[in-house]
Amino acid sequence: MSVFTPLARPELEAFLAPYGLGALRDFQGIAAGSENTNFFISLEQGEFVLTLVERGPVQEMPFFIELLDVLHDANLPVPYALRTTDGLALRELKGKPALLQPRLSGKHPAQPNTQHCVQIGEFMAHMHMATRSQTIERKTDRGLDWMLEEGGNFISHLDDAQGALLTKAVEEIQHRKAAIMGLPRANLHADLFRDNTLFEGTHLTGVIDFYNACSGPMLYDVAIAVNDWCSFENGTIDAPRARAFLGAYAALRPFTAAEAELWSTMLRVGCVRFWLSRLIAAESFAGQDVLIHDPDEFRKRLEQRQETHIPLPFAL
């Protein structure tokens, strides 16, 4: 179970008291997280999620709070930091940055269909438009420079075929880096996978886990999401789901010619980012009681993205 920082009931009760939300009824660690510690919290006045941030410097936490406030004010279904009666949003618990947020309803979609993909495409376009003109700057710690460095280091850990695949991808990132960084920018979720969303049927009720959010090229966010929402188990793209996602997005925020030119590259970049992070996690946490996502999922996707047959719609 991925609760990196266990909590006892008395210390939790002391932490929660300043919110003025009533007595603690129950709490439960959430096993699904692979980077942060999360608890479901049941108080007299409602259901909440407590997050202890395990990765990343504490000085960056105001970014996440501000971004979620902006998206909440734009009427998007996101969690946001609750304030104590003294107005504090960011606090500390067991030496870790801690946030209390409302618990959103719904479940992760196990088998996404075109209707789910339309909802996610629309959400992402609204998020990008809400932040494009006043982007809150944060450089991701797992961006192109990280991929070039870690990718170069990790090639020797792989067999010949996988090493060749990663080498080719790293070389492409190096070659296209300047063009990628010149694409239209906004704030990105940068991790908008199925398990970071909540649905009731095909109605989107929540997008969660913004702790990889950053500023950067909007197309990167789109590629990350399409790679997860629109892929078959063998790594190939499901054309109907991809067209539903991209069409819904483009109806609100049309793609540019430069984005259309780099679309295939960006799909591969999105695969490299998560293949590498999963490979590193699998080595770092081997034998530990921590949720580790399968690196092979993104190796397969990268292999299948060597040619892309789903163009961006409505490119101007």
Image (cartoon, rainbow, N blue to C red):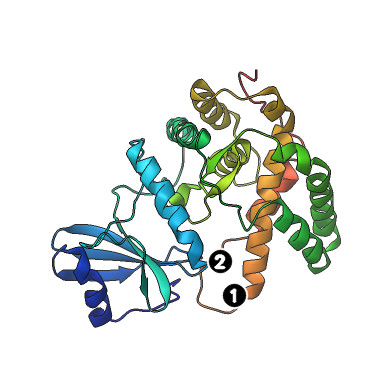
- Residue at 85 percent across and 54 percent down: it is 164
Query: How many marks can you see?
Result: 2
Identified by mark 2, the residue type is: Ile
For label 1, the residue is 285
**Res 200 seen here:** no
Label 1 to label 2: alpha-carbon separation: 8 Å
- Residue at 13 percent across and 65 percent down: it is 22
- Within 10 Å of the Cα at label 1, are there few (<14), some (14-19), or many (20+) other Cα atoms? few
| Closer to us: 199 or 222 | 222
Q: Secondary structure at mark 2?
A: loop
- Within 10 Å of the Cα at label 2, are there few (<14), some (14-19), or many (20+) other Cα atoms? many
Left or right for 216, reference 84: right
Q: Dividing the image into 4 quarters, which one contains the C terminus?
A: top right
Where's residue 12, x and y in %? 27, 75
Which label is found at residue 292?
2
- Residue at 52 percent across and 40 percent down: it is 135
| Closer to us: 20 or 4 | 20
Where's residue 179, x and y in %? 76, 37
Q: Secondary structure at mark 1?
A: loop
**Res 310 seen here:** yes
The picture quadrant where one finds residue 73 is: top left
The picture quadrant where one finds residue 82 is: bottom left
The outermost residue toward the front is: 86
Q: Dividing the image into 4 quarters, which one contains the N terminus?
A: bottom left
- CB under 8 Å between discs 1 and 2: yes
Mark 1 vs 2, N-terminal side: 1
Where's residue 253, x and y in %? 53, 25
- Residue at 22 percent across and 75 percent down: it is 13
The picture quadrant where one finds residue 150 is: bottom right
